Every structure is written in structure tokens, then in C-alpha cells.
Amino acid sequence: MWLAVWVLTVAAFLVAVVVFVKHWRRARSDGDQGMIRGIGFYLHTKSVMGLYQLHRYNEALEQEVEKRKSRGWRFWGSGGFGPLKGESERTDTDEEFRRYIRKAEPITVIGIVMKVLEKHHDIIYVDLAKRELVHNRALVKELGWADGPESTRQLKTRLRGVEAFVSVKGLFRKRSQTDTETVFVAPYGNPDDPEQSRRIRFTCVTSDLRDSAPAGAFRARCLGKVEDWDPETGELVVHPIAIFK
């Protein structure tokens, strides 16, 4: 009987170790994904500001910006008194955040945003060329997975229904450009004719481009939000927040 108790104890301990190691490795892989490699090419200021104004992210964004501010300068202003003080502080911090976005380098701003989104496990990483999704906690949360055998898991999903933010890496091409909009597309896989394959479409605000759009194909990564599927063109529409090439 005592032998059985010891065997069960050892088995429980081994299971706990396995679960701990899996979660530890998953946490490390989540953190590694946030490293941005490339040149800041596009940053949609209004989208970044919209993220800040969401209660889910604003406190974490404030803390990250506070860490990066120069010493001796109080970034978060306050003012007012009595019942108006809280509203005045909120207005001041909104304006200061807008000013920070305008003045800071895109790599700094988007680095802060991605760090905060990763803390909330709200980024799914997509490699279009390989047609792969990175197995991180955001994907686990999106698909409702639990720890268990791979055979019980849904291993494929449509990006169309994804609610989390997506970080899409692929081969981008400029389709069109006007004074107001610049449209990029990126195919799934690496087809001989990208226009004949399934694609993702990214519509950018031309004035928010930080550099001229390349004439040919270029490798890039886009942080954005899936909007909808366009049945007429056979394209998945993603709203771009930032693009790096």
C-alpha cells in the first residue's frame, strides 16, 4: 500500500514538472516573438491612440512610457482640484500620450505597444510564406486549447475569425497608391503568380507612411487587426497598425 502511495506521489510530481516546463517554454517563446527586426515603415497614430484609450491597455501603456521617459521630467501631468481633478488628469495624459506618439521613433512606439499586447497574450504570429501560426498563449486562448495530447487539438484555424491582434510576416507588394490610401497585398505561401492566390490586403493611410513604398516585392511584418473577408477579391482584410520591412 505504501509503495503504491509513493508511486502515485512520484507520478504526480513528474506530471507537475512536465506541465511547469511546458508553460515555462511557452512563456519564453511568447517573449521572444516581440523582438522587432527591421525598419519602421508605417505607423497608424490613431490606432495606437485608440489602444491607449481602451481601459484594457491604458494603464500598462502608461507604465511602459513612464519607464522610457527622460529622468527629471514628469511625463504624466495632473491638474484641477476636487471632483474635476480626475477628469483633468485623464485629459492631460491623453494629450501627453499623443505628443509622445508624434515625437517618438516608430520602433519605440510599436515596441511599447507589442510588449503590452504580449503581456495580455493578445498577439497571434503568422508566417504567410510557411503558412504557419506560432504556438503561443494567444493562440491557445483563441482556440480554447488546454494542456493535453496534440491529437485532441484543432491544429488549423481561419484568420478570418481571429479576435486577437495578428503579427503577419510575408512578402508584401504595393497594389495602388493615392494621396489618401496606399494598398499592399501579401499572398499565402510563395506562389508563382501572387494575384492568382489567396491574399491578405492592408490599406494604409498614405500620410502615415514613414518611407516611400518599394516598387517591387519586399519582406515585411505587419501588426494589425483582422477585419473581414472580401468575397469579391478573395482577400482577407487586415487593418494595419504598423509595418516593418
Image (tube, rainbow, N blue to C red):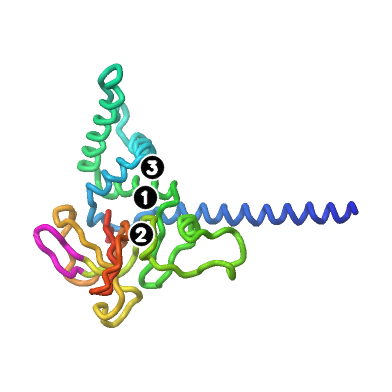
| Relative image position of residue 159 (x, y in whole percent) | 38, 65
Q: Disc 1 or 2, which lies upstream in sequence? A: 1
How many neighbours does mark 2 have within 10 angstroms: few (below 14), some (14-19), or many (20 or more)?
many
Which residue is tagged 2?
A: 167
Residue ID at (29%, 62%)? 238
**In the rendered image, the vertical position of residue 81 relative to residue 161, given as above or below:** above
Which residue is tagged 3?
A: 56
| Relative image position of residue 214 (x, y in whole percent) | 18, 66
**Secondary element type, mark 2:** strand
Q: CA distance from mark 1 to mark 3?
A: 14 Å
Residue ID at (12%, 57%)? 180
Q: From the viewer's perspective, is the residue at label 3 or at label 2 nearer?
A: 3
| Relative image position of residue 104 (x, y in whole percent) | 24, 43
- Drawn side of residue 72 relative to residue 209, left or right: right
How many neighbours does mark 3 have within 10 angstroms: few (below 14), some (14-19), or many (20 or more)?
few
Q: What segment carries the magenta color?
A: 174-183
Q: From the viewer's perspective, is the residue at label 1 or at label 3 nearer?
A: 3
Query: What amino acid is at disc 2?
Result: Ser
The image quadrant that residue 195 belongs to is bottom left
**Secondary element type, mark 3:** helix
Q: Disc 1 or 3, which lies upstream in sequence? A: 3
User: Is residue 97 something one can see in this rendering?
Assistant: yes
